[in-house]
Amino acid sequence: MLFGEQEIQEPVTPQAFLWSSEIVSQDDTWSAMESVLKSRRFPHCSLIRGSQGTGALAVALSLAQNLLCRESEIACGHCSGCYKAGLLIHPDLHFSFPVFGAGEICLDHYTAFRSAAQENPWMSVQNWLSITDSENKQANITAREARSIIERLYLKPFEADRNVMIVWLAEFLGKESNILLKLLEEPPGHSYIILITEDPAAILPTVQSRTQQFRLKPLQDADVANALVRKLGIKYDDALSAALSSEGNLPLALELAGNESGGFLKFIQQMLQAAYKKDPAEMWTWMEQVATVNRDNQRRLFAYFLMILSLSLRMGNDAYTKEQLQHPVLQYADRLAQRLGVDKILQINALVNECSYGIMRNANIRILLHDFLISLAGIIR
Ligand SMILES: [Zn+2]
């Protein structure tokens, strides 16, 4: 039967990836968002506030998927809207994010951004900039990009009945957000703009007042631990210690859990030992080892050290239970706290920050590490 009933059936869309599966620990905020979605009164301009590691991008992607579902207010998971939003290839889902270079627009970087967000919707801006190999350049959301945001939101939607624009890290707009004020005041009826910020203080009050705001909370330790077990397949105890160390920052916990086995702790022990003994041969060996790894790992090593120092500063007020203190990282932080005391830890903290900044600025790594070790020796000896 030519063009019979069977032949004109719509093709079946495969099960979509649901971005809500990436959200961790935000039950209250997420259920508030869901009820606004269900009421069909989701604001045309919203601002998600969440410090680094709370998963704001995953939340925004999930909101976008809900808004683009063709079947219901909450993503059904089997329509073409859900499917394409799950793969970040929906033609009515737009993105804006920090890039480097004055004349840049994000449309030229969509492919890289899509794959980065798919691979790690919890990425930090440093992760993103290291992917685009622009760590040492000043990232921003440019004036040209701000005008492109307006253009894309005024477009007639291609497939859905609406456009959704996610602006990841709106603080990078700086003064260019003035360009968006009129859009935020009166967005086209078919458009939704979701701003994300890790630094609300950097968002102009005139922008804040034009948006409905949602706040994400730092993650609960147990939720972070469960996410680590799920993502890395490690034991719950190991996961919990990384979770405790990260203070509710899942990507940091992922790095910690991954790096503990990678020997970061041992590296830091060796460094402190070499500085304490002020033994030139030991110092030289350590410096050479660090100088030869790539810059991203150097940055992570120093971030890891900063984390241990911050744990040391929290020791002493019964911040941890006996069981938690069994973990090697917490044990080590405790020993440092006892040996060095608050003043010295704060001095080392400032020194490590300075060194990390040098690494980000691409300073000569050997000179940087040498000066760092000498100053460190001066503090701890
Ligand atoms: Zn759907």
Image: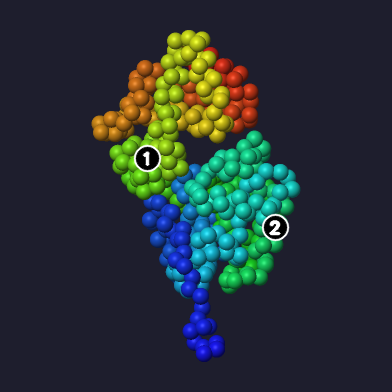
Q: Position of residue 324 (x, y in %)?
A: 29, 34
Q: Is mark 2 within 8 Å of ligand 1?
A: no
Report whether 346 appears left or right of 324.
right
Q: Position of residue 174 (x, y in %)?
A: 65, 46
Vertical order, 146 against 379 (above or below): below
Q: How is the image coloured?
A: rainbow
Q: Is mark 1 within 8 Å of ligand 1?
A: no
The number of numbered badges drawn on the structure is 2
> Would you name the residue on which mark 1 appears?
243
User: Mark 2 packing: few (<14 Cα in 10 Å), some, or many (20+)?
Assistant: some
Q: Is residue 364 visible?
A: yes
Q: Mark 2: which amino acid?
A: Ser
190 or 275, nearer to the observer? 275
Q: Which residue is rendered at x = 29% and y = 30% of the image?
A: 325
The C terminus: image quadrant: top left
Q: Position of residue 275 (x, y in %)?
A: 47, 14
Image mark for residue 172: none
340 or 213, nearer to the observer? 340
Residue at the limit of the structure toward the front, as seen here: 1
Report whether 38 appears left or right of 355.
left
Q: Mark 1: which amino acid?
A: Ala
| SS state under label 1 | helix
Vertical order, 294 against 40 (above or below): above
Q: Which residue is rendered at x = 57% and y = 57% of the image?
A: 166
User: Mark 1 packing: few (<14 Cα in 10 Å), some, or many (20+)?
Assistant: many
| SS state under label 2 | helix
Q: Which residue is rendered at x = 61% and y = 18% of the image?
A: 367
Q: Position of residue 82 (x, y in %)?
A: 50, 66
> Would you name the residue on which mark 2 appears?
148
336 or 239, nearer to the observer? 239
